[in-house]
Image (tube, grey):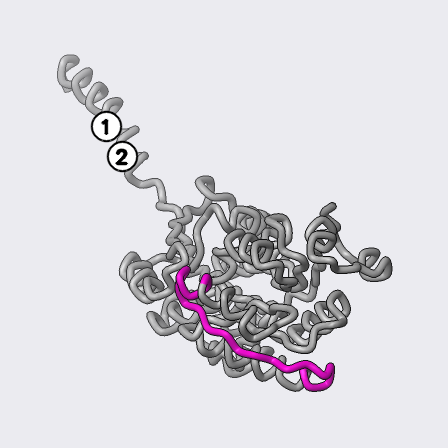
């Protein structure tokens, strides 16, 4: 080989080898993260999910990529979001709310799904068994529906003079509304309370529901633990203050914004566990062989400033049990 030809060959190799090396670098596995709310509402929960993913050995942008899809409270967008993630052939779908999980399950029986749900996934039709979910789906269940009677009991403890209690639910999320009602009706009877059902599926409906409370002479309000209302925690708290209505919900944000009380599963704990499970699925474990985990951490938050404005006496025993008391 002539010297000039040899130099040309070396120069070409030096120029092309780095490009070839980059082309051969394997693409990162992709998690399709879908949620019915908005990122600003779920910042704490998202941080917990990423923490759990990190515990399983995965860091976004380092050895995994995450594509986020938020419905911004418009739950009717979830089926299209799920279908888009299926078309993109993501490695796993993290469906982090009950409605998101239902939409993801309807969209695919092939791509692994890890869900986070506020109710019993068997009763919601997501899985047939908690111990062996089978198929392509597994996840984390909160206890917000199951502990609804306890939430009502605590509200009654704060407002002992109440004889009528309203329950605000979203008719578009029929399963959650029905499951909560079934839990609350016998609990209300045992406490000597009349339970009134109110429906809201829009901001206008919420405003109208609060106007009806005075007409019904309701003494306290329970709010259904679901995505539609969670994304409106601040709005609900402000309305409760304006209408001088003692109300109970499941999110800390509701109490921080002026709501009287929240009692429910720790969303952060549930999302962390969902992150861990997502990492385990990425490592090759089959979703159908991972038993459904229950997030058993329950949190109680109270707002003493709101209690004073409402004329509500908070027993020291109850305040002492709270995870946080806002004064």
**Which class describes the residues within 10 Å of circle 2: few (<14), some (14-19), or many (20+)?**
few
The magenta stretch spans residue 206: yes
Q: Which quadrant of the structure image shows residue 299? A: bottom right
Label 2's element? Answer: helix
In the image, taking residue 292 as reference, residue 316 lies left or right, namely right
- Image point (56%, 69%), residue name: 214
Quarter of the picture holding the C terminus: top right
- Image point (86%, 61%), residue name: 317
Label 1's element? Answer: helix
Which residue in the structure is indicated by mark 1?
16
* Residue found at the very far top of the displayed protein: 3
Tag 1 near tag 2, CB within 8 Å: yes
In front here: 27 or 143? 143
Where does the image place residue 261, in percent across and percent down from the top left? 68, 59
Quarter of the picture holding the N terminus: top left
In front here: 23 or 235? 235
- Image point (23%, 23%), residue name: 15
Checking the image for residue 20, the label placed there is 2
The segment highlighted magenta reads: 188-207
Q: Is residue 37 above or below residue 187?
A: above
Where does the image place residue 198, in percent across and percent down from the top left? 50, 74
Where does the image place residue 219, in percent across and percent down from the top left? 65, 70
């Amino acid at each position: 080989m002539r010297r000039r030809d040899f130099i040309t060959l070396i120069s070409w190799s030096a120029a092309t080898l780095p490009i070839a090396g980059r082309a051969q670098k394997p693409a990162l596995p992709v998690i399709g993260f879908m949620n019915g709310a908005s990122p600003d509402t779920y910042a704490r929960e998202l941080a917990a999910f990423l923490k759990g993913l990190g515990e399983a050995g995965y860091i976004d942008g380092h050895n995994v990529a995450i594509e986020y899809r938020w419905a911004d409270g418009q739950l009717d967008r979830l089926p299209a979001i799920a279908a888009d993630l299926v078309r993109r052939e993501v490695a796993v779908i993290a469906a982090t709310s009950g409605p998101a999980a239902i939409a993801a399950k309807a969209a695919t029986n092939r791509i692994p799904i890890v869900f986070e749900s506020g109710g019993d996934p068997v009763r919601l039709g997501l899985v047939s068994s908690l111990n062996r979910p089978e198929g392509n789906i597994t996840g984390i269940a909160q206890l917000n529906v199951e502990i609804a009677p306890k939430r009502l009991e605590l509200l009654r403890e704060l407002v002992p003079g109440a004889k009528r209690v309203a329950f605000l639910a979203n008719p578009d999320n029929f399963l959650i509304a029905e499951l909560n009602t079934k839990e609350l009706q016998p609990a209300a009877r045992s406490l000597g309370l009349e339970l009134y059902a109110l429906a809201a599926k829009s901001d206008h409906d919420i405003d109208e529901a609060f106007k009806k409370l005075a007409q019904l002479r309701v003494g306290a309000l329970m709010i259904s633990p679901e995505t539609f209302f969670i994304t409106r925690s601040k709005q609900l708290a402000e309305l409760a203050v304006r209408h001088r209505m003692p109300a109970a919900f499941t999110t800390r944000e509701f109490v921080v914004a002026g709501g009287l009380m929240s009692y429910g599963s720790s969303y952060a704990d549930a999302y962390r566990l969902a992150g861990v499970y997502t990492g385990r699925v990425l490592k090759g474990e089959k979703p159908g062989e991972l038993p459904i985990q229950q997030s058993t951490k329950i949190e109680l938050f109270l707002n003493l400033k709101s209690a004073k404005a409402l004329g509500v006496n908070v027993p020291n025993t109850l305040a002492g049990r709270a995870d946080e008391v806002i004064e």
